[in-house]
Amino acid sequence: MNAPSEDIKDMLEAESSLGLTFAENLFIGKEPTIPHDCVTIYDEIGNMPDLAMDGTTYYYPIIQIRVRSIGYREGWTLINNIMLSLHGRANETWNDALYTVIYCSSGPALLTWDDNEFCKFIVNFNLQRRESA
């Protein structure tokens, strides 16, 4: 299976209304200095895996998505739309993983204003996934 951030990247890119394109305004693991308006997905420490009675292992990773924006309203709108796009998704296969549920665990919220006076918003998601059959 991919890192969860890879699959989430594919989900966000597929949602055309968000206007996100990998390596242009959508990144994984490290926020670039440019473009100023961008989205970055981080793999966070998740919960321990669970072994089902049939031998299937379920994994419970956590991801954090950060939006950096020059404008507060634009940044808030984008992080909220990302939350609405991912929250409640269930029984979807992406790459080699079946996502049985994705849910927002906190946020969206303003994290900080950076040294350039750009606002940064975050939203966190808990995932439940297993290898697809």
Image (spheres, rainbow, N blue to C red):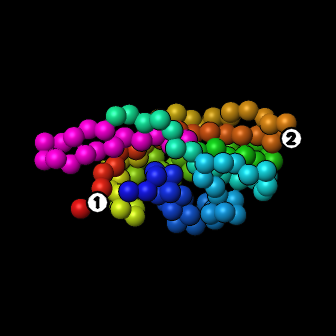
Corner quadrant of residue 95:
bottom left
Disc 1 is placed on an element classified as: loop
Task: Classify the position of the N terminus by image quarter.
Answer: bottom left
Q: Nearer the viewer, residue 69 or 22?
A: 22
Question: How many circles with numbers are drawn on the protein?
Answer: 2
Callouts 1 and 2 close, C-beta under 8 Å: no
Q: Amino acid at mark 2?
A: Asn
Mark 1 or mark 2, whichever is nearer to me: 1
Name the dominant secondary structure of the magenta segment: strand
Q: Residue 42, how many percent across, how many down?
A: 57, 45
Q: Nearer the viewer, residue 115 or 82?
A: 115
Task: Classify the position of the C terminus by image quarter.
Answer: bottom left
* Residue wearing tag 1: 132
Residue 97 appears left or right of 4: left
Are there few (<14), some (14-19), or many (20+) residues within 10 Å of tag 1?
few
Residue 32 appears left or right of 6: right
Q: Is residue 63 visible?
A: yes
Q: Residue 94, how many percent across, how many down?
A: 40, 62
Q: Residue 80, how many percent across, how many down?
A: 60, 46
Q: Residue 105, how many percent across, how many down?
A: 47, 35
Q: Residue at x 72, y 40 (%)?
A: 120
Q: Is residue 91 visible?
A: no
Q: Relative to 108, is 102 above or below?
A: below
Q: Which mark is residue 14?
A: none
* Residue wearing tag 2: 116
Q: Amino acid at mark 1?
A: Ser
Corner quadrant of residue 98:
bottom left
Q: Relative to 69, is 110 above or below?
A: above
Q: Relative to 77, is 106 above or below?
A: above
Q: Earlier in the sequence, mark 1 or mark 2?
A: 2
What span is colored magenta in the figure?
49-64
